[in-house]
Image: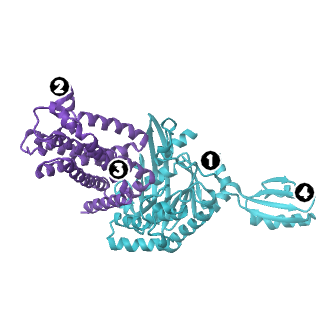
């Protein structure tokens, strides 16, 4: 009971911070919109090479953009926890009886809410550009966005609080996000890749989410790809939350 | 009645393969309603000890009872009953003053209504009532500090820890802070345990001072006791003309432990200034010495610190911790002073 209340207190505090700096929410959204406008139109030509596919280029590309949005929106949240550590506001909360799990969960749920809202905006913009996809598929894609955000933001907070230095945290993130971006098939479907690259890509969790959302966007729900995506998404979220919780609950942070 | 009782509290850090003993077995007892100060240089282990007592750091060994709860077995019980104000404070720069006070009360599991009431009452006490709608980053240093302290008091704890509360404040704000700290105890009976590296502050504010050096408490007592124990009192005698006759008289007195002459001023050390004074004045008068002035002075805590630790206490404020973001990677201090847990490591590097 008290954990739920604590979580809601932290969640609302994070939302209040956003309302004071709304410009960051727009900046986070602007990147995928730019990709949509300046990169998306080229895809319809490129994807002709990928004969096996059904659906328009937008149905292939927007799922990637959704994952990209979640990747860059959630991976960097750890910086805020470093700032909270430095200003002492983290310590000031840790010395109260507040649940330490709630200190993490309130933040994570805030990020999930923000990313879901941004995803809806992105999908609406894509519809303007020409995306057509079944509503159920879009709803399923939002579930994947929520799972991915939950995973990445838990990991980012946990790592941020463990490292506590921007100078160490920043290079780790850069490497991780670029690798995930390239290997997940966000930009182009991995079916275009040579087989060794395709195999490497299968080692990264995002690959399964991107493929699953692509299936959902063309209305194929009962596929092994969707099932795999759900399994990977749920498993990753559970593991990441556990790791983040471990760091937040350590007695000596 | 003891509100803090610690035995053999110790903390060891492992950094880069080296073991650093930041705190090496601290025994201490603080009575309810006392204002007790931890005095020491940076790196002496003050903050580490405070963080252990406030459940923020697990002791490597030793045990303690804090506000009636066992530190190791019931840290949640300790947290409910103490307030803790860290070195950097804890208010978020973007948040509103009122919001922070209200949230803190709710984090202490008060109902929203109760938290609102307490926030208003704490704000009233600390002179923050007109600032509730202001953003924290727009406050002056003194206002900010009062808010930090208010955050530690919203749940009316019987015991509050203040880590270097006056660091970085101008003299006026510092005196104001002392005033508020005394009121905490005098009007609400709150026990205050603070750390400081200002002798002046320990002297002016604390009922009892624990001097800490290199992870140990080296001496403790009331400021008065400490001064008496270590150095005796200093009497300055200024004579109207040649100091030689006066010097001859004073050197012959058994209660004079030491004597120094500086122009027409004679400085003598005695065990108890007030008691020695009348005898000395009579002897000087009997020898026909004409006095300009005479003054009894207690030794400062500076001398106490020097005598107890063998090195002087630097009265200058320490270099403020620079945010690591502003430090180029190559120049980043391996023991970042922004991280209080590194305090012990700093001490060792100094030594």
Which is nearer the eye, B120 or A220? A220
The answer to whether tags 4 and 2 share a subunit is no
Which quarter of the figure is the C terminus of chain B placed in?
top right
Q: In this figure, which residue is indicated by the disc labeled 4?
A: B243
Please report the residue visible at 17 percent of the width from the left and 34 percent of the height from the top: A47
First in sequence: mark 1 vs mark 4:
4
Tell us which disc is closer to us: 2 or 1: 2
Drawn side of residue B235 relative to residue B13, left or right: right
For the question of whether residue A212 can be seen, the reply is: yes
Residue B182's quadrant in the figure?
A: bottom right
Mark 1 vs mark 3, CA separation in Å: 56 Å
The x and y percentages for residue B113 are 33, 74
The answer to whether tags 3 and 4 share a subunit is no
Chain displayed in cyan: B
Image disc number at residue B309 = 1
| Proximity of marks 4 and 2: CB atoms separated by less than 8 Å | no
Tell me if mark 3 has few (under 14), some (14-19) or many (20+) residues whose alpha carbon lies within 10 angstroms of its own: few
Mark 3 vs mark 4, CA separation in Å: 80 Å
Question: Which colour denotes chain A?
Answer: purple
| Proximity of marks 2 and 1: CB atoms separated by less than 8 Å | no
Q: In this figure, which residue is indicated by the disc labeled 2?
A: A195
Image disc number at residue A19 = none
Q: In this figure, which residue is indicated by the disc labeled 3?
A: A27
The x and y percentages for residue B230 are 67, 54
The x and y percentages for residue A156 are 32, 45
| Proximity of marks 3 and 2: CB atoms separated by less than 8 Å | no
- From what the image shows, is residue B317 above or below residue B284? above
Q: Dot 1 lies on which element?
A: helix
Residue A57's quadrant in the figure?
A: top left
């Amino acid at each position: 009971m008290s954990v739920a209340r604590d979580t809601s207190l932290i969640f609302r505090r994070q939302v209040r911070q956003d309302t004071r700096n709304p410009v960051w929410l727009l900046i986070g959204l602007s990147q995928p919109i730019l990709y949509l406008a300046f990169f998306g139109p080229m895809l319809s030509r490129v994807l002709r090479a990928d004969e096996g596919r059904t659906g328009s280029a937008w149905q292939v590309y927007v799922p990637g953009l959704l994952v990209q949005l979640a990747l860059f929106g959630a991976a960097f949240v750890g910086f805020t926890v470093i700032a909270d550590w430095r200003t002492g506001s983290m310590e000031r909360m840790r010395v109260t009886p507040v649940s330490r799990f709630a200190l993490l969960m309130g933040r994570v749920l805030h990020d999930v809410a923000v990313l879901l809202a941004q995803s809806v905006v992105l999908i609406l913009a894509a519809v303007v550009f020409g995306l057509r996809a079944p509503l159920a598929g879009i709803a399923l894609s939002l579930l994947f966005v929520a799972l991915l955000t939950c995973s990445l933001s838990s990991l980012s907070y946990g790592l941020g609080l463990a490292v506590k230095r921007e100078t160490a945290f920043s290079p780790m993130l850069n490497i991780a996000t670029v690798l995930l971006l390239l290997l997940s098939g966000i930009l182009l479907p991995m079916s275009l890749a040579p087989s060794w690259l395709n195999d490497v890509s299968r080692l990264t969790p995002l690959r399964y989410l991107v493929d699953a959302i692509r299936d959902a966007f063309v209305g194929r729900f009962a596929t092994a790809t969707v099932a795999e995506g759900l399994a990977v998404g749920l498993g990753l979220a559970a593991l990441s939350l556990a790791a983040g919780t471990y760091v937040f609950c350590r007695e000596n942070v | 009645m003891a509100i803090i009782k610690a035995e053999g509290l110790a903390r060891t850090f492992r950094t880069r393969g080296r073991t650093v003993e930041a705190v090496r077995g601290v025994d201490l007892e603080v009575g309810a309603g006392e204002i007790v100060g931890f005095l020491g240089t940076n790196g002496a282990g003050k903050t580490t000890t405070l963080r252990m007592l406030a459940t923020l750091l697990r002791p490597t060994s030793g045990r303690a009872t804090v506000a009636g709860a066992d530190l190791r077995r019931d840290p949640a019980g300790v947290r409910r009953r103490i307030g803790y104000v860290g070195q950097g404070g804890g208010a978020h720069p973007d948040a509103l003053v009122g919001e922070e006070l209200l949230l803190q009360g709710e984090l202490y599991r008060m109902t929203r209504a109760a938290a609102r009431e307490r926030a208003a009452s704490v704000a009233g006490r600390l002179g923050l009532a007109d600032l509730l709608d202001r953003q924290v980053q727009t406050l002056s240093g003194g206002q900010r500090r009062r808010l930090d302290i208010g955050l530690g008091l919203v749940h009316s704890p019987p015991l509050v820890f203040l880590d270097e509360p006056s660091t970085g404040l101008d003299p006026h704000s510092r005196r104001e802070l002392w005033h508020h700290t005394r009121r905490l105890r005098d009007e609400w009976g709150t026990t205050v345990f603070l750390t400081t590296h200002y002798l002046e502050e320990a002297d002016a504010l604390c009922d009892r001072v624990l001097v800490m050096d290199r992870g140990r408490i080296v001496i403790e007592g009331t400021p008065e006791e400490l001064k008496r124990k270590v150095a005796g009192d200093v009497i300055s005698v200024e004579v109207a003309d040649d100091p030689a006759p006066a010097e001859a008289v004073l050197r012959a007195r058994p209660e004079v432990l030491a004597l120094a002459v500086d122009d027409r001023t004679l400085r003598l050390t005695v065990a108890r200034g007030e008691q020695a004074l009348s005898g000395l004045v009579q002897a000087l008068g009997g020898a026909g010495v004409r006095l300009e002035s005479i003054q009894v002075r207690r030794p400062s805590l500076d001398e106490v610190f020097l005598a107890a630790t063998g090195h002087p206490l630097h009265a200058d404020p320490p270099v403020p911790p620079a945010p690591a973001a502003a430090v180029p990677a190559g120049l980043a201090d391996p023991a970042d002073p922004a991280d209080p847990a590194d305090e012990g490591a700093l001490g060792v590097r100094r030594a």
